[in-house]
Amino acid sequence: MDDLETRELRYFIAVAEELHFGRAAQRLGIAQPPLSRAISRMERRLGVALLDRNRRGVALTAAGAVFLRDAATALDAVAAAAQRARAAGTRVKLVTKAGASHELLRRVLDVYPADVDVVLCEVGEQAEYLRRGDADVALMHRPVDDLVGFDSEDLLTEGQVAIVPRDHPLAAKDELSMDDIRDVPDLPMARWPQLDGTYPKGPGPEVRAQSQIAQLVALGQALLVIPASSRAWQWPEHVAVPVVDAPMITTVIGWPAGVRSPEVSALVRSAVGIAFERRTVALGVRRSTEITDRRISS
């Protein structure tokens, strides 16, 4: 079978989304007969029916539904490759959630030997930046961010904190559990979008922007749970309290699978080295504290 052309993929996607050859042809700016012939030729070459045509209209077959998903992904990949080619030899673009992993990011920018443009985004948007080719590399968090289709290196694993209003009784606690914050009547937990874009059920407000949730917390209308290193953006009206049994969060540096320029490789090596240094220092401090505590107790 000959390789499919991007033109054919665009034709099929238009018909699959419109489920009408006339509307698809109008959307593409071509006549309907050539469009119908192009889809039929593609089906013959693939050896499978993608569309079910009858008097009631057009519907996707099971094979067509699968092909629609993969065709859209393929076109996105081609567009991203073109974008990366145009940007080759220019500054590396790193995308990260605003306020996330601030200290690590600042250290990376201090030591990385090349220019980096930092692109700040909202929750869960890094994957789309990478897929569109609008960023070369991203700081992301497992398991809350979408890492499908990306290569990555782990940097730091950490606990989470609850961000609560300074004048709320929870702010006076040294630590909290998930049970302590799950059903607070006057302070519902903010709900972030899940990997599929939907929100979990609950009484708390649906949020996506850091500025949005920051003000809701300051107004005493919500609390949130975030990685400890993401608290750099907290307001004076906020207090961060460790949540001892919250899921651990791992900061990773990710990039499109199989796409790693020399500049991105250098940035990844720098980030991994800095993270290793931070872990080594933290381990040394803990061991020194444990030795001191044992000496005092003896």
Image: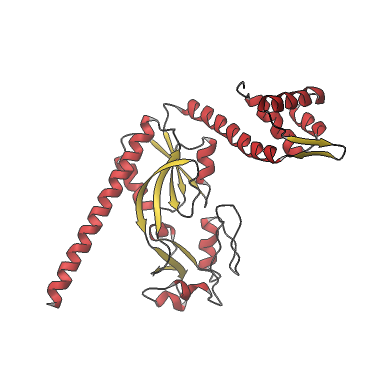
Q: Is residue 56 above or below residue 245?
A: above
Give the percent coordinates (x, y) of residue 59.
77, 40
How many numbered badges does the structure rendering display?
0
Q: Residue furthest front?
A: 47
Quadrant including the N terminus? top right
The answer to which image quadrant residue 209 occupies is bottom right
Q: Residue furthest right?
A: 55
Does residue 237 appear anywhere in the picture? no
Q: Residue at x 77, y 32 (%)?
A: 24
The answer to which image quadrant residue 28 occupies is top right
Q: Residue at x 46, y 64 (%)?
A: 225
Quadrant including the C terminus? bottom left
Q: Is residue 158 left or right of residue 127?
A: left
Q: How is colour applied across the structure in the image?
A: secondary structure
Q: Nearer the viewer, residue 174 or 34?
A: 34
Q: Is residue 224 left or right of residue 274?
A: right
Give the percent coordinates (x, y) of residue 278.
27, 52
Q: Is residue 132 left or right of residue 288?
A: right
Q: Residue at x 59, y 61 (%)?
A: 206
Give the percent coordinates (x, y) of residue 250.
39, 54
Q: Residue at x 40, y 77 (%)?
A: 172
Q: Is residue 4 above or below residue 115?
A: above
The answer to which image quadrant residue 162 occupies is bottom left
Q: Nearer the viewer, residue 71 or 273?
A: 71
Does residue 127 appear anywhere in the picture? yes
Give the percent coordinates (x, y) of residue 29.
76, 26
